[in-house]
Amino acid sequence: MIKLNKSKIPKILIDKGIPENNKNCLDYDEFPDNFKTGEQKFKFKNKIYADKTTIKEQLKTDQNNKCAYCETKYELMFGDGDVEHFRPKGSYKQERDEKLNYPGYYWLAYNWNNLLFSCERCNRKHKGNLFPIKKGTKRIANHKSLKLENNEDVLLVNPYFDEPDEHLGFNKNIVYGKTEKGKKTIEVLGLNKPELQEKRREYLKLFQDNFSTVSNNIFKNKSLISKTPVVVYKALKKEITKSEKNIKAFKSDKGQYQLMIKSYLKTK
Ligand SMILES: [Zn+2]
């Protein structure tokens, strides 16, 4: 997970999202108890919050075509990826094995700051409706709360608002939590599940191979021994340029698993 920046709010969220949200808040005000028991549920319109040509595309661009959480490339994802609500809109859970609590953060269903692009693995298989907050702290219950969302003590790193490397670190391809929030994030998103560890291991191997390319190509090339210094210099320079170009591509935010790559480079 790396730090992300959000672009301008898409027009559809203003034109259609705001009226829809106002309607939901009025419905809640009318029958709050029905919503609290889950007897009455909101009907959220994914044609608005997950609009393919606006919201989804814009989020993908903001995130360099990667999952906001695990940094898997869109092209390598299983499925088409999801527009995911950081704070679950319909219902939430503090712990994985507890029952759903109602309502969720319904007033943030069409809120640009609450939307991310995520792979189905992170969103559906692991996070789901889990949204843990620090024990003993208060959760925002409805749209009338005076407490702002960013003051809630959430135990899940949001790459748009947090600095992921303050909470998450890497030992080779294994991610570890530097804080309570980091540890819980790994658990909620399954960031150390074997299949993801394996993908990161392969990527790191490819990256490391680029480091050794230069020395291998130069020192194993025996024909260079008899050549003049100028020829050797040119061959060396060519290999270094090629390797530098590859390393730059690996280090770019567009590359996969950048927090791991950055952590790896710090150890060099
Ligand atoms: Zn993911």
Image (cartoon, grey):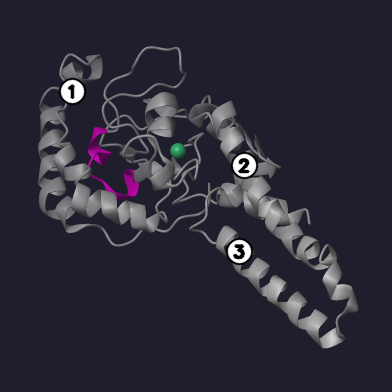
Whether residue 193 is visible here, answered yes or no, is no
Disc sitting over residue 202 in the figure: 2
Q: Is residue 5 magenta?
A: no
The image quadrant that residue 146 belongs to is: top left
Q: Which residues are magenta?
A: 106-115
The image quadrant that residue 45 belongs to is: top left
Whether residue 89 is visible here, answered yes or no, is yes
Residue that carries the numbered disc 3 in the rendered image: 246
User: Which residue: 41% across, 54% down?
Assistant: 63
Residue that carries the numbered disc 1 in the rendered image: 32
| Mark 2 or 1: the one toward you | 2
SS at circle 2: helix
Q: Is residue 111 magenta?
A: yes
> What is the x, y in percent for residue 64?
42, 56
Which of the two discs, 1 and 3, labels the residue nearer the N terminus? 1
Residue at the outermost right position: 226
> What is the x, y in percent for residue 131?
42, 29
